[in-house]
Image (cartoon, rainbow, N blue to C red):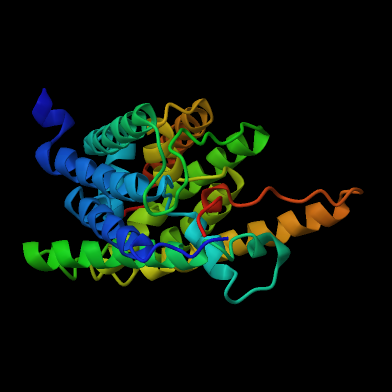
Amino acid sequence: MTERHPLFLPAIFVGGLVFGAGLALSRMARPEVVLDFLQFDDLGLLLVMAGAAGVTGLTVVGATRLGGAAPLTGQSYGRRLKPFDRDVLTGGIVFGVGWGLSGICPGAAYASLGVGNLPILWAIGGMFVGAYLHGWLRDIARRARPTGARDPPDRATRGER
Amino acid sequence: MLDSLFPNGTLPYLLGGVMIGLGTAIIYIGTAIPAGASTFLESTLSYVSDRPRFARYHDSRGWRLVFSAGIVLGAAGYTLASGEWAWTTAVQPWRLAIGGALVGVGTRLGKGCTSGHGVCGLGSGSRTSLTNVATFVLVAVGTAQLVAALGVTP
C-alpha cells in the first residue's frame, strides 16, 4: 500500500462542492420539486439527470479512451459496472416507494441540509436507520449461509490507498 | 407546450445537472472513482457500529465524509450567494422520515441511488443501473401519485 496523494481529499472536496452547488441550483434539494416531477407537473428533473449523466458519460468515455491511470490514485480508468442480481430490482422498488413518499434522495438530502432546510434531518435520520436496518439484516443472512460467504469489498476503494 | 412541461423554466435544471456532472467528473478524472452519495450512509455508520457489514467501508469512509461535507457546503455556498438560503420544506416530517428510511434500505439493497446508478451508472451505460433507475422512477411516480390522490399535501 502506498501513501495517499496529498491532493486526493482536496479533489474529492472540490468535486463535492461543485456537486452540491449543482444540486442547489437545479432545485433538486427541494422535495417539492421532485414530487412535482413525479406528478408530471414539472419535468425539470429529466433535464437535471440528462445534464449530469451526459457530462459524466463524456468524462468516463473520454478518460477510458485516453487510457492511463488517475493521477491521484494510480487507479486505471474504465467503466466499473455493478453486477446485476435480484437485489437491484428489489432495492429499486423499495427506493422508489421511499423517494415517491418523501421526494428526497441521499445526495439531494445532504445538499438540502446545506440550504438550511433543517426539517430534512428527518429524512437523513431515516436514511441512516434504513441503512443500519439493511446492514443488520444482511449480517443475519450472511451468518445463516453455511459457507459464511462474505460480501464483496467496496469496489470504489480498490487501489486507492 | 414547453411552458406546461417546464413551468419553472429549463435553464436552472440544465445548468444544475451539468454542474452535478462536473462534480463527478472532477472526482473521476482525479481518482477514477465514480462517486455516489449513498454509500456514505453505511461508511459513516462504521464509525459507530462494529457490525461486519459496515467494516468493509473502513478504507473509504474518510473520503466519503469529505465528499458529503463538500455537497453540504457547496449547496450552502450557492444558496447564500443567490439569497435562497434557509429555504425550508413543507413536506410533512412523517413522509420525510418514513420515506428516508425506505430510501436507506433501498439504496443499500439496490447498490446505489440517484447519483451512483442515475448519474454515474447511466453515464457509464450500465444496464444494471438502467434497470434500477427505471424501476425506482416508475415505482416513485406511482407512489407520489397515490399519496397525492389520497389527499396528502404536501
Name above or below for residue A114 compared with residue B95.
Answer: below
**Nearest the camera: B62 or B73?**
B62
Asked where in the image residue A107 lies, by quadrant, the reply is bottom left
The N terminus of chain A lies in which quarter of the figure?
A: bottom right
Residue at 34 percent across and 69 percent down: it is A119
Asked where in the image residue A78 lies, by quadrant, the reply is top left
**Residue A155 in the image, given as x and y percentages of width and height:** 57, 47
Residue at 57 percent across and 69 percent down: it is B45
Name above or below for residue B37 compared with residue A80.
Answer: below
Residue at 56 percent across and 44 percent down: it is B111
In the image, taking residue B88 as reference, residue B121 lies left or right, namely right
Is residue B122 visible from the viewing direction of this image?
yes
Residue farthest along the top direction in this orientation:
B1
**Residue B7 in the image, given as x and y percentages of width and height:** 12, 37
**Residue B117 in the image, given as x and y percentages of width and height:** 45, 39
Asked where in the image residue A138 lies, by quadrant, the reply is bottom right
**Nearest the camera: A135 or A65?**
A65
